[in-house]
Image (cartoon, rainbow, N blue to C red):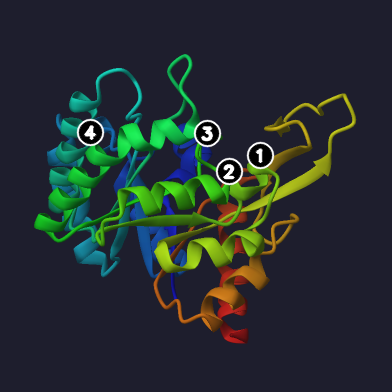
Amino acid sequence: MKFGVSSYSFSAYQKASGCDYFALCDLAKEIGFDGIEFIDLNPALAGVETEAQAAEKIREKCEALGLPIFAYTVSANFLDGNMAAMEEKICGKLDVAKILGVPLLRHDAAWSLPSGMTWEAGIEEMAPAIRRVAAYGESLGIRTCTENHGYLYQAPERVLRLMQTVNHKNYGWLFDMGNFTCADTDALAAMPLARPYIFHVHAKDMIIKPTDGIRPAGMNSGTGIHYWRGTVLGHGQVPVVQTLRALHTQGYDGTVSLEFEGPEDCLSSIRFAHEYLRRIADSL
């Protein structure tokens, strides 16, 4: 496996320091990651005016560092009332991904349902547009995928239904091992359903505790069964080691990106996580 880091992991540091994307690339390389992943690009953080210009500058920087860009992660909502516009938007993001030089684009499916629509009907409604996006990505040599993310399509059974309904060889699953917490399950339970579709993996950890009626400050609640918050990889209850070992045993030899979103100091947390991932890799 190759281990990268999402630019999202550096959010607190980036906000506090005002640093640009190029400083993040330098940090990822210095820490020792094999690659980096970017989320929706802000041109201002690359000192340019457009997303496409930012992608070009970042690609040039990463090529100079010898730091591959694993994926481009973008927001989407195919049930926002204008599916044609959303399809056009994500195809435009694929054009940016091509400039960025990535092999993979992750887009969301939907965040909420129109009144009266079931989650199953939502999948049937979205699938043709997501399939066309996947086909366009295939024409560019870029795979597309959706993450178990955003509550509505976060439970493994729902994501599986999405994969099966879209049914396109260029469309797969970004397997986020921490996000299953928000659907009151875990990565090991989801693995049998997800494994045939996994294109990319997010390594993430969570502190999890049963709900007791009073949610602690700084913690979240999804279905009401657990409270949770992000934390340093290895410090929480997500089965990180077991998940990576299961993936390895089942033949996964792809990319894994650290996604840190805890309140701890992000630079030290990212360094701790990198060291932890390397020790896990050595144990495989």
**Rounded to the nearest whole Å, what is the CA distance between mark 3 and mark 1?**
25 Å
Left or right for 232, reference 152: right
Which mark's residue is nearer the viewer, 3 or 1? 3
Mark 1: few/some/many CA within 10 Å (<14, 14-19, 20+): few
Distance from Cα at disc 3 to Cα at disc 2: 20 Å
Q: Earlier in the sequence, mark 2 or mark 4?
A: 4
Mark 4 secondary-structure assignment: helix
- Can you see residue 89? yes
**Sequence-wise first label, 3 or 1:** 3
Check disc 1 and report the residue beneath it.
263
Q: Report the amino acid beneath label 3.
A: Leu
How far is disc 1 from disc 2 in space, using C-alphas? Answer: 7 Å
Residue drawn at the location 67% of the way across and 55% of the way down: 186
Element marked by disc 3: loop
Classed neighbour count for the residue bearing mark 4: other residues with Cα under 10 Å, few (<14), some (14–19), many (≥20):
some
Using the rendered view, name the quadrant where residue 245 is placed.
bottom right
Amino acid marked by disc 1: Pro
Q: Residue furthest top?
A: 115
Task: Give the number of the disc on residue 261.
Answer: 2
Q: Position of residue 185 (x, y in %)?
A: 69, 51
Asked where in the image residue 154 lies, by quadrant, the reply is: top right
Per the image, the residue denoted by label 4 is: 43
Where residue 36 appears, as percent x and y from the top left, is: 36, 58
Mark 3 vs 4, N-terminal side = 4
Of the image marks 4 and 1, the number of the one nearer the N terminus = 4
Q: CA distance from mark 2 to mark 4?
A: 23 Å
Give above or below for 125 relative to 100: above
